Image (cartoon, rainbow, N blue to C red):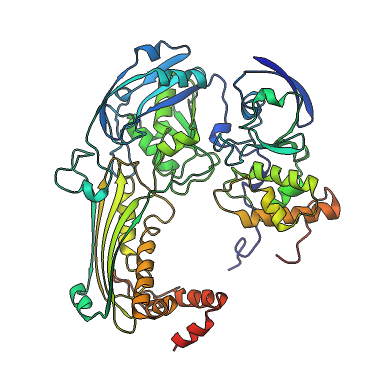
Amino acid sequence: MALRVVGQNEIRVDGKAKVTGKALYPEDIYMDNMVFGKTLRSNRPHAHFTLNLEQASQMPGVLRIFTASDVPHNAHGVLFKDHEVICRDKVRRVGDPMAFVVAETEKEATAARDAIQVSYEDLPAVFDPEEALKPGAPLVHEQGNLVYRFKLRRGDVAAGFQESHAIVEQEYRTPMVDHAFLQPESGLAYMEEDERVVVCAATQYPHFDQLEIAEALALPTEQVKVVNPAVGGAFGGREDVTMQIHLALAAQHLKRPVKTTYSREESFYAHSKRHAMVMRLKTGADREGNLLATQVTIYSDTGAYASWAINVLRKAGVHATGPYVIPHVHVDGYSAYTNNPYAGAMRGFGATQIPIAHEMQMDALAELLGISPLEIRLKNAFVPGSVTATGQTLSESVPLVECLEAVAEKLGLKQSLREVSP
Amino acid sequence: MKTIQLTVNGKEMTLTVEADQRLLDVLRNNLKLTGTKEGCGEGECGACTVIMDGAIVNSCLVMAFQADGKSIQTIEALDSEDGSLHPIQQAFLEEGAVQCGFCTPGMVLSAKALLDKNPTPSKADIQEGISGNLCRCTGYHKIVEAVEKAADTMKEGGESHGTARRGTK
């Protein structure tokens, strides 16, 4: 088969528009008669609230202040519909949207947003996923704080530890991380002549956004069109909708193009984070450094909303052995709601956190056994034919040993490599 | 309100600006030169880089009235009307130095300001020249290679567009 593109030095299709500054990101789109929206966000992690809009709605230029009661079906979310489009009477994190103010100019919208009086009644809050699962913990959502329970069992870890010569037991914590894509969220919505609402926003999932907008506004999907202009980076942070439904709602009511652009600070409040995780690992090896057993407990902090909590924890759990053959494996994972910023997709999707833990375990075991960190990895590395903890036989590309050897050579560790290799 | 006179991409103009408008706002909102991007609004990311009297500035940190009497170059000034690209733009394309593209206009202008002053920069000079511009896609290696390539092209043939290849990379 002749390959037309693979192996060729191709110029990317959007390259020329980007080097000339002509590529249109959402904030670069201007329309006649356009008005501006600003989001009022919670500054409390967990509270009941009421709004007094009287003063704000009298402010110059204000067209309308949208609140929860304007949203026909006030729920969205990629897996569970646990986000409110606009919170009704309770906020679950700092940054939760409480109102969407639309005015003739951006300045007027900002002034009116800042003039809304918010009365909070603070609720007890929880900021640690393990604490959130204890009896009596504050409930972020009524149905309880456990979002997902992951279990993986292979062999008999008790027997594995019994046979082990060296055992390392440690706790590791990784923090939430922001994507910090360079283009802060921006979007524009308008009505077409056939009453279809069009939303232009930089997104990773235009088809998901279409469904979420249609469901929230109780419209048939064909009445909603999502246009994805140039996207200024995403890294997982644009998988969940932020302003898309706000914009569609406002355009639908006002019959004018509505635009909103987040500042860098608001962008940090608005979108998801990488899941912070608490990981406890107990790993055992025999005298020669062959891994025998690992017992892993993971608490994954999904913050105020579930987003991709299930998929992310599952991935962390599946990868808990690292790229190593371990006969006895026992993994327990818990993903919990807290009042932290919500967590979702970010680069690696759960496979980024757990290596911090399993690789530290490898170093610690090597030290305990008096062998090199390279040796213990080469001894246990997956090779073609290895069976993973989830029962998968690796049959194709498994170039870990080659990779380690190449790195060792570059680092001048060839000597120790020779001592290890058969 | 204040009236300022400035030159933008070779065109002299008189503009009425508000006291709290930044140069960035004037370029984007008044002149619709949207190739200049706002990434952070506080001078950290360099997406809003423009050339002012020959030196790069973050246009989010320059108030509009401070641009009175100045000459500004934005990304829109670089390519020709016939659609041909500046050697720096061409090199960015060919070297794969563009990913999400949001840093690209600022990067290209920082590279231009550098090459205008120093046509034969070392790798370290280039790295320093773009040190005020963040690429969150982290494509720095290719960006540096693109600037090296552009320097070679411009040395060899002025504005003729880049078929020259570096011998080594």
Asked if residue A248 is positioned above or below residue A51 in the image, the reply reads below
**Where residue A77 sits in the image (x, y, percent)?**
33, 40
Residue that extends furthest to the bottom in the rendered view of this protein: A422
Depth check, front residue: B166 or A47 = A47
Q: State left or right for residue A135 relative to residue A345.
A: left
**Where residue B1 sits in the image (x, y, percent)?**
64, 14
Depth check, front residue: A59 or A259 = A59
Q: State left or right for residue A134 relative to residue A191.
A: left
Residue at x 47% of width, y 30% of height: A198
Asked if residue A141 is positioned above or below residue A348 in the image, the reply reads above
Q: State left or right for residue A266 relative to residue A86.
A: right
Asked if residue A401 is positioned above or below residue B144 in the image, the reply reads below
**Where residue A19 sits in the image (x, y, percent)?**
67, 44
Residue at x 44% of width, y 12% of height: A59
* Tally of numbered discs: 0
Residue that extends furthest to the right in the rendered view of this protein: B157
Quadrant of image for the N terminus of chain A: bottom right
Depth check, front residue: B85 or A380 = A380
Q: Is residue A103 visible?
A: no
Quadrant of image for the C terminus of chain A: bottom left
Residue at x 66% of width, y 45% of height: B107
Residue at x 54% of width, y 37% of height: B40
Q: Is residue A247 visible?
A: yes
**Where residue A207 sits in the image (x, y, percent)?**
42, 42
Classify residue A379 by image quadrant.
bottom left
